[in-house]
Amino acid sequence: MSNINLIIEERPADIGNFMVGRLLPFRNKRMVGPFIFIDHMGPVQMNERQNMDVAPHPHIGLSTLTYLFEGHIMHRDSLGTAVEINPGEVNWMTAGKGIVHSERTPEYLRHSDKSMHGLQIWVALPKELEEMEPSFYHAGAEELPAWEEEGVSYKLIAGEVFGKKSPVPVYSELFFIEIKSKERKTIKLGDRLKGEAGLYILEGSIESDGNIYEPKRILVAKDSSLCEFTIGANTTIYIFGGVPFEEERFIYWNFVATSQERIEKAKEGWQEQTFPKIDGETEFVPLPLARKY
């Protein structure tokens, strides 16, 4: 990607009984557009005794986007939602003023070998929508706009770009695009991206200004309107970003807000267990003593 401003490497992070590669936030770049948090899960193989079990935990002030390459996750939340997410589908949960959810290996897979690989992403809400009512949306793989240009495959996972729009109900100007190529190709996105842009390399490589970049890193552009690079053969990348917010965002554990006071209120609410509950689930993840990013 020409005019690269920053390279962010994955850093290991523990999310309970699961290790992930953390990409955002980063000390020198807290957000890319409205994207404030990105974890790369796996790839990991689990046997019949190992399962993903993320107990009920809260969120405020953001939307979560789960996108799997491999594996299956059972999502339950305090709205009464119970949905299995499969590869290529999108789980879009908007926390607003507060929501609680759990993420687990589905029951039918808990006693067999299984794999897990995907992205978990947080998108901050605009200030005026921080206290909106929580909601949930699930998009099947076939609902997402997909097309080819000059032998390169594109899929619009969220947002609006290139004259196409994903059905995922976003609340600010953003884009999250999958690009795959079996052959070496030059990609010229030009002025078709609005705002800031980051590029995540899942597999393969890209070349820019004579440099070759390999997986497990984000490249952040100085100017998204000058986004041009060469994609290697058998490469999959994700380009994300959008128009940044004017206000600073505070982040503590699973809480995102435009004020520290709102963060403190959420911390108190979770300690006192005043958040809504998930039907049938009684355990919960305790508030960590210190979890700033």
Image: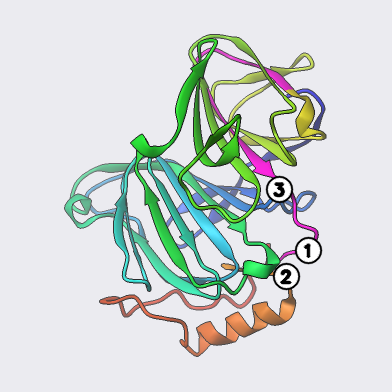
Residue 155, horizontal then vertical, whole percent: 48, 30
The residue drawn where x is 78% and y is 63% is 248
- The residue at the point 58 percent across, 31 percent down is 163
Left or right relative to 253: residue 107: left
**Residue placed most toward the observer, 13 or 180:** 180
Magenta region, residue range: 228-253
Q: CA distance from mark 3 to mark 1?
A: 12 Å
Hey, which quadrant is residue 89 in on the image?
A: top left
What is the secondary structure assignment of the residue under circle 2?
loop
Residue at (57% x, 55% y) in the render: 122
Q: Quadrant of the C terminus?
A: bottom right
Question: Which residue shows up at 50% across the image and 52% down it?
Answer: 169
The residue indicated by pointer 2 is: 258
Q: Is residue 16 above or below residue 268?
A: above
Give the mark nearer the N terminus: 2 vs 3.
3
In the rendered view, does 6 fall on the left or right side of 64?
right
Name the residue carrying label 3: 33
- The residue positioned farthest toward the bottom in the image shown: 272
Assign a secondary structure to mark 1. Answer: loop
Count of numbered labels shown in the rendering? 3
Does the segment drawn in magenta span residue 262?
A: no
Q: Which residue is mark 1?
A: 248
Q: Amino acid at mark 3?
A: Gly
Dot 2 amino acid type: Thr
Q: Amino acid at mark 1?
A: Glu
Q: Distance from label 2 to label 3 (Cα)?
A: 15 Å
